[in-house]
Image (tube, rainbow, N blue to C red):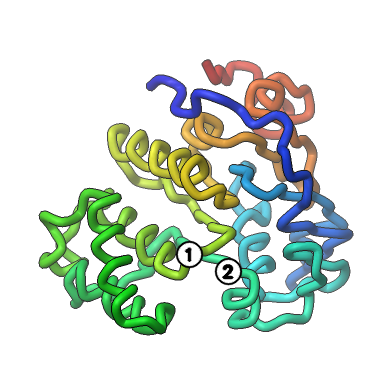
Amino acid sequence: MGIIKKFRIKSFKNKNSIIEFKNITLSYGKRIILDNINFKINQGQIFGMLGPNGVGKSTIFNLITGLISPDSGHIKINQEDVTNYPIYLRTKKFKVGYVPQYGGYFNELTLHDNLKAISEIVIDNKNLRSEKINYLLSKFELENVKEIKAKFLSGGQKKKLVIALSLLSDPKVLLLDECFAALDVLTIKMLQEIIVNLQQETQITICICDHQARDLLACVDVAMILSNCKIIAQDTPNNLVNDINAKNAYFGESFKFN
């Protein structure tokens, strides 16, 4: 598969970080998950997270959304400390959207009714609801399956539906958890193009975690590697695959990106 991202944003016009972790530590009982980690995601960036199972990638998403709280340290969104903010406030005030690895839709509702149900929660103006739904149906090429129940959609159609649902509220930050998992090559390429196009069209900030290293690196500007509760490397994709720490902890010597 060819590289999806035709360019890399090496220098952002707006250097402001939209998400920042400062000295974040989290443990479950005696097991340390994250040990004093620090990183920033800049506005308009597509940011990737890689690492072995159980290393804390999904935990970082849960910390960003407020589903869990750190033992120590601070989380900032738009340079405001949100460490003690509840989920609803982070979602409404800072417009954080989340696409889970599994589910995220109503099985027994049609694709269109899924969009309609969520639009009634996140869009106050009734006229704007239909306009936004029609826009997303067209954007994701879902018009021909809009009357099919969600449980009967293909894997790629379900993933497009969940992303469309998350975009109803016009998020400024979109978190994609294992978005390439269990999908065929063509569907993965389609999702990569959707992600890159969203950045180009809306300047949305996107954070992706996944085990599919090549697929993730093909569409991000910057990625980091988590291992043994720490961030052991962070850089552009081409630099990251040549980083000795990243090779030792995750990629190995035989991994080829291009």
The answer to which image quadrant residue 153 occupies is bottom left
Q: Earlier in the sequence, mark 1 or mark 2?
A: 2
Q: Residues within 10 Å of mark 1 (few under 14, many from 20)?
A: some
Q: Secondary structure at mark 2?
A: loop
x and y percent of residue 223 in the render?
66, 38
Quarter holding the N terminus? top left
Question: Considering depth in this image, is 123 or 161 the residue closer to the camera?
Answer: 123
x and y percent of residue 220 in the render?
57, 36
The answer to which image quadrant residue 85 occupies is bottom right
x and y percent of residue 18 in the render?
72, 56
Residue 208 visible in image:
no
Looking at the picture, which amino acid does disc 1 mark?
Answer: Asp
Q: Secondary structure at mark 1?
A: loop
Q: Which label belongs to residue 215?
A: none
Question: Considering depth in this image, is 49 or 193 the residue closer to the camera?
Answer: 193
Q: Is residue 20 left or right of residue 217?
A: right
The residue sitting at 35% across, 77% down in the picture is 118
Residue 189 visible in image:
yes
The residue sitting at 64% across, 70% down in the picture is 94
Q: Establish if 153 lies above or below 212.
A: below
Q: Which label belongs to residue 170?
A: 1
Q: Residues within 10 Å of mark 2 (few under 14, many from 20)?
A: some
Q: Which label belongs to residue 95?
A: 2
Looking at the picture, which amino acid does disc 2 mark?
Answer: Lys
x and y percent of residue 221 in the render?
62, 34
The residue sitting at 78% across, 29% down in the picture is 245
Question: Considering depth in this image, is 184 or 198 the residue closer to the camera?
Answer: 198
> Could you tell me how many numbered marks the image carries?
2
Q: Establish if 43 lies above or below 235.
A: below
Q: CA distance from mark 1 to mark 2?
A: 7 Å
Circles 1 and 2: CB distance less than 8 Å? yes
